[in-house]
Amino acid sequence: NRIHKCIQEWIESQPNSQELLQQIGYPQVFGISAFQALQARKSQNMPLLAESLFVNFEYALKTLINQERGIIQLKVNANRIRNLSTEIMENILIQETKLSQEKANLKIFYDAINDEIGFLRNRKKFLVELIESTLKSLENKVNESSYLLENKLKQAAKELVESNSINTLEQATLGNIISTNLQNITRDFVNQTQMDVQELLNVTLAQIKDFANSLGKLIVLLNEQTILLGLETAIDSKTIYICRKMISFLDADNQQKTINFSLEFTANPENFVFANSGSGVGVATGVAVGFVLLGPLGSAIGGAIGATVGKNLQNSQFTEKYQIFVVSVIEKQLSSMNVRKITEDYIFQATSELRELLNLFTQEVNLILDNTQNRLSTNYAKRSTQIMTKQQEIHQIQENVDKIMGEAQVLSQVLSQVLSQKLSEPVA
């Protein structure tokens, strides 16, 4: 009892006495004579064995080995379960964090691509409207220029006649001057029209190509991100091929020459040379005109002048009537040729490929954007469902592990109490 009391006092003096008591139990002290016990075992002397007090120690030792060992092993296993459960819970927390981050990244990616697709849709709409508006402006500008061409030709003819002092013998010189100036005016009109058309084609094709490049970059980025995020279905290669083919086509189309649009008068002096006929009427000889748009104009002017001007016409009368007649011929010829219609046809023909390209471009872009957005939505929904399913599975595992940890904790406490009680029982 004195020894037990000393041990009890020592345990109570420790800062963690209860924890220490649960871990090692209450120590038991046996006063035995090892020599007597050894002699008694050898000689089978039971009274001597009893006198050695070894029997009580032997019984307590067997009890510890046979009974309390099982309790200790259960407690060790319970503690091991708790430790493993703690590791599992830590791993679950890591997985939950990873899934939450993946879900957040997926949402950011989905919103960013959706915004980019929306931006490209608006940009495509604006681009198409801008090109159509530019085409319309070009048509209006050229139509206005073709309308003003008649006034320019008539005004030029008047000024030339008024600024040149001539008689009937000098008509060839004036005819050549008029022909050359009309040719220059029409060439200026043609050149300006061609420049306007070419500028429109260059700017428009560059705008479409720039858009196609942006679209191609979006598709490549989307394809890379879908793979990076582990989405099962990436953007198919056909979509990327269409974008690259579109850019290649635009490069080739931009190198094509514009449709020829010319308006030229041949500067042959004989066009406006007048000779006497038997009836006293002058006729034009050697009339030849080499232009596409207003071919008969020079011929009509030269022929009409030759047919109405005679050698007996006075100079003053010649100047006045020559001017009136040239103007009337220009008006008549332009009216019969329908310059505006021919010019409109040229504009339509020169921009027809652009219009076809624009229609094809619009269809392909709409198809690409629709397919991309549909595929993105499908992948996003599928991956979001997968993440949610994993989160639910992890949550269920977490609940099960938490339950196991609680049960292991209770078992460990019960076993500690039982073991402590067993170890603290005094030996009879």
Image: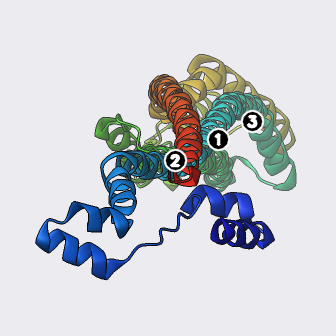
Assess disc 2: are there few (<14), some (14-19) or many (≥20) residues with their C-alpha within 10 Å of its C-alpha: some
Specify the label residue 176 is tagged with.
Answer: none
Q: Give the Cα separation between the discs numbered 2 and 3.
A: 116 Å
From the image, tell me which residue sits under label 1. 104
As drawn, 230 above or below 369:
below
Q: Give the Cα separation between the discs numbered 1 and 3.
A: 60 Å
Question: 256 or 125, which lies in front?
Answer: 125
Q: Given the image, on which type of amino acid does mark 2 rest?
A: Lys
Q: Which element is circle 3 on?
A: helix
From the image, tell me which residue sits under label 3. 145
As drawn, 60 above or below 235:
below
The x, y position of residue 108, in whole percent, is 66, 41
The x, y position of residue 113, in whole percent, is 60, 39
As drawn, 51 above or below 296:
below
Assess disc 1: are there few (<14), some (14-19) or many (≥20) residues with their C-alpha within 10 Å of its C-alpha: few
Q: Give the Cα separation between the discs numbered 1 and 2.
A: 56 Å
Q: Given the image, on which type of amino acid does mark 1 rest?
A: Ala
- Is 106 displayed left or right of 150 in the figure? left
From the image, tell me which residue sits under label 2. 422
